[in-house]
Amino acid sequence: MFTKQGPTVRELAVQALSSTERGYDLLAPKFDETPYRTPDRVLDAVTRAVRELGPFDTGLDVCCGTGAGVGVLRQLCRERAVGVDFSAGMLAEARGAFPSGSEGPAVHWVRADARSLPFAPAFDLALSFGAFGHFLPAERFGLFAEVYGSLRPGGQFVFPLGAPPPVGSRAYWSLFGFDAAMRVRNALWRPRFVMYYRTFRLGDVLEDLTQAGFVVRLLPLTELGLRPDGSPRARLVVATREGQDVSGGS
């Protein structure tokens, strides 16, 4: 993170004391040089798994950031890929990464809050990478309902979800410490910067997806590795808006 290309400690401190939106505006030019950007191996594993669920004409990247998920959609969708984010800075970086006139499906960018998506049921596929920690648990059902309303009948909402680290492991205490520090920061400082690692638990997520109207299944992403007990380190959540698309889409 602290290379010449990545943000400095001072830049990260300024970001952390800003609002979530302003913080990402500031981080955007160097975001792809940080560990926060979803690794290519995760993007590739999801691409291969979702390709088997298609075909798809139109796709939506929810909380697209600098556009890594749009890159996945361009490999999966035949007609159009849309990225939506509330950070103008992140969208500016994404536009630069996918200039108009590039080969493949058309790409569009929309600035909007994912808690209030401005779309009719127009998409065959929605996905998201690394964004759910920016939503409080009470906001999660509303977020899922917004995605549901943006999908055509038969459309699918997919995202990878890693297994929690073993209790007592270094990773466990690292995430526990980060979340505790963020809670203290948000209790003492305004505006809040919402980013938590331990609030997106599988059981709660499945319940909220179901309450939003989705039918949900889990697919193992075995190429991302196995835990000592043989279970996958990551799964693909596949949430489907049931019904048939009478317009003839996917």
Image (tube, rainbow, N blue to C red):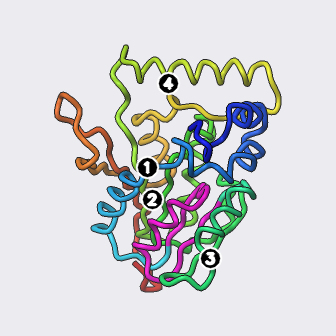
For badge 4, the amino acid type reads: Leu
Q: Which residue is labeled 3 in the image?
A: 99
Q: Nearer the viewer, residue 247 or 107?
A: 107
Looking at the rendered image, the disc whose residue lies closer to the viewer, 1 or 2, is: 1
Q: Which residue is labeled 4 in the image?
A: 175
Q: Disc 1 on helix, strand or loop?
A: loop
Q: Where 24 falls versus 231 (above or below)?
A: below
Residues at circles 1 and 2 in contact by the CB criterion of under 8 Å: no
What residue sits 17% from the left and 34% below the top?
Answer: 230
Q: Which residues are the magenta region?
A: 59-84
Q: Which residue is labeled 1 in the image?
A: 39
**Total numbered badges shown on the rendered structure:** 4
Residues at circles 3 and 2 in contact by the CB criterion of under 8 Å: no
For badge 3, the amino acid type reads: Pro
| Residue 94 x/y as whole percent | 63, 64
What residue sits 28% from the left and 49% below the top?
Answer: 221
Q: Which residue is labeled 2 in the image?
A: 157
Evaluate whether residue 146 shows in this view: no
Mark nearer the N terminus (3 vs 4): 3
For this orientation, the residue located farthest to the right is 190
State left or right for residue 5 relative to residue 191. Answer: left
Evaluate whether residue 127 shows in this view: yes
Mark nearer the N terminus (1 vs 3): 1
| Residue 17 x/y as whole percent | 77, 31
For badge 2, the amino acid type reads: Phe
Mark 1, residues whose alpha carbon is within 10 Å: few (<14), some, or many (≥20)? few
Q: Estimate the spatial distance between the alpha carbons at disc 3 and disc 2, rounded to whole Å.
A: 26 Å
